[in-house]
Image (cartoon, rainbow, N blue to C red):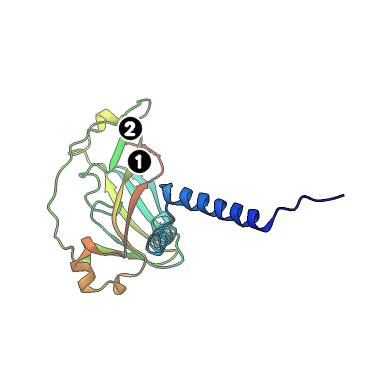
Amino acid sequence: MSSLRLPPSLRIFLGVLVAVALFSLYRSSTFRFPGPAFIAESFRMASRDVSSPIPGLEVSLHQPKTSPPTITVTVTNKNSHAVTVLSYDSPLDSLALQLGLLSITPAGASTPIELPTIQVRRFWPPRRDDLISIAPGASEKQDIVLDKPRIPTVKIGSKGFVKLTGKWGYVWAKSKDGISAAELENIGSSKDTYSGAFASNNLEVTVA
């Protein structure tokens, strides 16, 4: 069986023609391979998302007593390292109820009751005392009292459901001792902080 053999000059001509066609296609295409800087930044952002301590912060509610109705907020650090959170607008904020972070839905209702909220002026930059460190596997707690001056218990009835939702403003993947004064002073521009949403369990409460 004989095979078709092209003359050397024709093979060279076809090779040049293919090369020119490929080069023209490359020049006319709008696609550009990402440069090293883009790849490095994408890798850094992906690594940062993976290393965020926020998914390891578990927010849970339970009711230790019914008179007055009291909700205990527990934040447990499920990470393998210490975590520090800014208390402002967090589940551990002593003003969580007044800031509207806690929703209360009467049993049988489809929407939460409307509660009065407040606006507060915070120290800024925050003070070191406004930071809360949680060791790996440890928990921090905060009580929320559903007292009558602020909570119309007549609207809740004898039972209802409460849930805490909001956003972590500033979270560090280290202990408070590892946060420098300069870092705290320039907290808004720090690259070592994380933020993200939080949500607790939906807890059934009893009102005495």
Nearest to the observer: residue 191 or residue 108: 191
User: Mark 2 to mark 1: distance in Å?
Assistant: 9 Å
Please state the horizontal and vertical placement of residue 152, each as a whole percent of the image.
22, 33
Q: Residue at x 35, y 26 (%)?
A: 110
Element type at marker 1? strand
Amino acid type at image mark 2: Thr
Q: Tell me where residue 46 appears, x and y as whole percent.
A: 43, 58
The location of residue 156, given as percent across then percent down, is 29, 31
**Residue found 28% across the figure and 52% down from its top:** 90
Q: Residue at x 37, y 29 (%)?
A: 107
Q: Amino acid at mark 1?
A: Lys
Q: Earlier in the sequence, mark 2 or mark 1?
A: 2
Give the position of the C terminus as an image quadrant.
top left
Q: Residue furthest left?
A: 121
Label for residue 105?
2
Q: Nearer the viewer, residue 183 or 108?
A: 183
Mark sitting on residue 163: 1
Q: Secondary structure at mark 2?
A: strand
Q: Are marks 2 and 1 in contact (CB under 8 Å)?
A: yes
Graded by Cα atoms within 10 Å as few (under 14), some (14 to 19) or many (20 or more), the crowding at tag 1 reads some
Nearest to the observer: residue 83 or residue 98: 83
